[in-house]
Amino acid sequence: MSRIGVFICHCGENISRTVDVELVASTASQFPGVAFATDYKYMCSDPGQSLIKKAVSEHRLTHVVVAACSPRMHERTFRKAVEQVGLNPFLCEMANIREHCSWVHEDREEATQKAIEIVGMLVERVKKNRVLPTITVPVTKRALVIGGGIAGIQAALDIADAGHQVVLVEREPSIGGHMAQLSETFPTLDCSQCIMTPKMVDLANHPNIIMHTYSEIEQVDGYIGNFQVTIRKKARSVDENKCTGCGICMTKCPQKKIPNIFDRNLGTRTAIYVPFPQAVPNVPVIDRENCTMFKTGKCGVCQKVCGPGAIDFNQQDTLIVEPVGAIVVATGFELYDITEKPKGSPIKGYGEFGHGKIPDVIDGLTFERLASASGPTGGKILRPSDGKEPKQVVFIQCVGSRSREKGISYCSKICCMYTAKHTMLYHHKVHDGQAYVFFMDARVPGKSYDEFWRRAIEEEEAVYIRGMVSRLYQKGDKIVVMGSDISVGVQVEIEADLVVLATAVQPRKGADALAQKLGISYDKYHFYSEAHAKLKPVECATAGIYLAGACQGPKDIPDTVSQASAAAAKVMTLFSKDKLEREPIVARVKENNCVGCFACRKVCAYGAVEEKEIRDRQGNLIKMVAYVNPGVCAGCGTCQATCPSKSVELDGYTDEQIVAMIEAL
Amino acid sequence: MHTEKPKHDFEPKIIAFVCTWCTYAGADLAGTSRMQYPANVRVLKFPCTGRIDPVFIIKAFQQGADGILISGCHPGDCHYISGNYHARRRFAAFRKLLEFIGVDLNRIQFSWVSAAEGGKWVDVVTDLTERVRTMGPMVEFKDLALEEQWSGGLNSPDLQEIYEAM
Amino acid sequence: MTQPIDISGYTRITESIRTEAKRILSDGTVSAVIGYTHVRRKGSTQPILITNPDDSEKLFFSEGCLNNLVVYLTKSKKDVPKTGKIGIVVKGCDLKAVVGLLGESQLKREDIYLIGVPCNGVLGSLINPATELNTKTIAAKCRECTDRMPVGADFVPPVELAAMPQMEATYSDKIAKLEAMTPSERWEFWKEQFSKCIKCYACRQVCAFCYCEQCVCDRNRPQMVEQSPRPSGNFSWHLVRAIHLAGRCVGCAECERVCPMDIPLNLLNRKMAMEMKELFNSEAGFEVREKGPLNSYDEHDDESFIR
């Protein structure tokens, strides 16, 4: 038998001005099951809460309804109050007679009547409320970081420094990502390698970090605090434990003419290689597609010269399972290319720029390699076609970005700044050269950014032309750039020696496939979606997974590092407790009734529904039923509305509770 | 400032099924902004429109609702990623069924009202209330209930007499 | 004008089914075969489950084979599926139910052996079982059937079907007529129909998709649907039934056939199927789908009805 207490708040005069609170209280006291009803000036105040607590004890109340403001305002307050006198917090409900009643209706009679009905509904509802114990989930205090660029490195170091183990997975043979490819970085022009490589070494030497390079995520199971991640460690053909990194294999390898991807195909490398001299780990990998041994079965020079005997042509991919409690996704970006795209592709190429077939039309990252002291030209700006020093260089911004007709409508954010940087680097290296920049508008907000951009124009003599380029074509050894200068309204034609395109930032290829493994959502460009654009910019909607860097959207280095540290902080918050507590508003399956049609699993956006076997005592399979993992369930209840037999029920919003309210109408 | 409210012969009963994150919060905002709207609506709070079962709608009509409002987050804004998309499909189908068996769809309103749209909440509720008021009471389901009472014949004078004698 | 329907192929289909059933039972492919058999009353049929190859002679196919046998494979008939791999005789329409159940994890393809029957239609009812099959006596569902040849069955008798005469589409016509009415006229129509309902639940019992262990309509806490066979509860039952089958019903029309009160139940199902096609471009029973139309969504779904 319920003994319900009903507490009507005046909210000063906010409620009592239009609602006859005494009448509501006296009417409510007559409702079946109500043992006590009263009204008070400020229920949420200390004396108000004491009044409730006292009444619960004195009248042996089993349930409480507080008729006051919106539950969004004070539900927590009152639930906490009843908990202090030994009542389960979920046996307390709020009737919203302020926002939904006294504030929106002027007629006292009408408002009072409505308030009585609202209270009546909640009284019927609370009778059906059940004791809900707080749900706790254990937390594995190890983190997985996917991606070994600056974002992944920063997040991994922060978490590891806090004393937690980190597993870092990098697809390439070395960590470092794009930042390792850059020459100098804006707005300070400090050398990228100089600030990056120490961090890479720190990571490799950190006692709390396990690094899996040349590895990919195969499968992700589990949920917040309890993920099981299967990692595919690709066959390197070199034993990491034996290799000393002496490099003799690379000097002796007969295959020397393979385009170097790290140098944007400008230089060459051998078939056994490290991507760049400062690679971490400094362990080469055999490129099986180009290795003579793998192609013809004859060669094996590297194996012969390797002192420690680290070369293993028979090495296989291995699968490693790592238990982790949280995941930071930092898979970064790649640059859009202007080549012809397949028919029907939403993103188009640039036929007007020669579809990438003019050798001296390069992108920004290639220019970085040209300008880098460790690059294929040793830091000299030499054009790819004939190795001559270009005297007229045209930079074109917003290639791919901000052009709806080409399929990408977003701004890539970093191009304005790096193009300004490129003009400066060019000016420093080719004193008699001239840089031109075609731009739509300069988007350079950020600390010291605008000053930097202005310096490119005012001190480093870059000529900025506001307008777009309509066509590029080869003429002799020059590239004719046809564009417009909209600020003066004239057509411009420049005969350039080199053209540098600031192409759009795109998510990595395969970003969608990884998202599906992780169960996180992504936008139409395959950038990963944060849980809330403003208030949860680091979290994914899937609990326990966090985002860092350009995989979420175009970002420069300072923003990427900030977000990586923020993601690390979120992971550390999660790891600060041994167990995770959560509100027990989760779905539960009534296994007796469930027939295993798994409609619930089909509609669950969180992947919280699993298959469970029901067996008899002899171990024979009786049936398969759904099981809702309370650690993953977010409590939306879509499963229950979908289940034809209502074999899954959302605690806190059961059919009984809802039907009780409807029937009270 | 206080305008005289017209008294009506018929005050419809409007039941609103709303999600807690958007529409309930939008209705709260209408309150904090002291907007005014008809007092006919009773709000049932759900975590998400995805939780709203079509059976509740039938149940509400049987309990005497004259009009029904189902409202949640705008597409893309669902707190639970996709609950409102599922609800949109479910009710796109269910309203067709109701229409086919002869329920006037003017009695059911679907809307997206965000937590920032207090004004829209007021408009939606006001419009629905006024529309249902002009349509008059929803008698169909209530009549069915009445038929039930007759079929048992509990109110016949003979039975009444016997009952009282007992 | 009534025209006869050529079903001369049914005799050869019968022979073919018998041979195949005998083969798969003898070589152990299946442990049982579900099919149709004669009963004493001429022209009438009943379902049969055979486990002995010699019983294959009992099987046959005729215009009187109305039942959708697939219902015997679902969990509501618990004992049948437990016997091992099962052979089952299915018409094109029944086969669609199998496809639906595969998508709803109720069947595993490797657990069933499908003997598909090329079909030129069956009778509307067995009240007069000896009736000749013609454009008048043919079942309403067969009038608008597009699945005469079973697709994806393990075995199909090698029989060419005779061409069918043109027939009016009864369901579409009726739906169009109802749609042209005012809401209150439609309400009156359904009120009369549903008032007849005696809640015998034959429609539920015979439906391949009503495989829930406990129907929501039998639930007491809370009572979502009033259970007594009175108008209000009847309305709820038929509405819940229609919405739960929406996007899943394959139109075998068994519910309508078994209804002792002649309520046009398939009309509701067909209407919902039409809506599923129109709203979500979804049709049940043609392919094993991971998700049905009402447990999936598209961001660009129509929302013209939402303010």
Image (cartoon, helix red, strand yellow):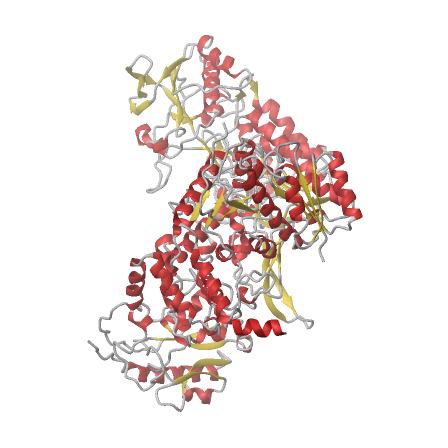
Q: Which residue is more in the foreground, A589 or A332?
A: A589
| Residue occupying image coordinates x 51% and y 25% | A375
Query: Can you see residue A260?
Result: no
Q: Is residue C39 left or right of residue A27?
A: left
Q: Which residue is more in the foreground, A636 or A179?
A: A636
Quadrant (top left/top right/bottom left/bottom right) for the N terminus of chain A: bottom right
- Which residue is outermost to the left? C1
Seen in the picture, residue B14 relative to C231 is either above or below; the reply is above
| Residue occupying image coordinates x 36% and y 41% | A345
Q: Which residue is more in the foreground, B162 or A444?
A: B162
How many numbered marks appear? 0
Query: Can you see residue A359?
Result: yes
Q: Is residue A549 left or right of residue B9?
A: right
Q: Is residue C8 left or right of residue A536?
A: left
Tell me where residue A404 appears, x and y as whole percent.
Answer: 36, 32
Res. A40 image quadrant = top right
Tell me where residue A311 appears, x and y as whole percent.
Answer: 60, 44
- Which residue is outermost to the top? A459
Res. C41 image quadrant = bottom left
Seen in the picture, residue A664 relative to C13 is either above or below; the reply is above
Q: Which residue is more in the foreground, A285 or C150?
A: C150
Seen in the picture, residue B40 relative to C4 is either above or below; the reply is above
Tell me where residue A217 appears, x and y as whole percent.
Answer: 57, 45
- Which residue is outermost to the bottom? C40
Tell me where residue A571 appears, x and y as whole percent.
Answer: 66, 37
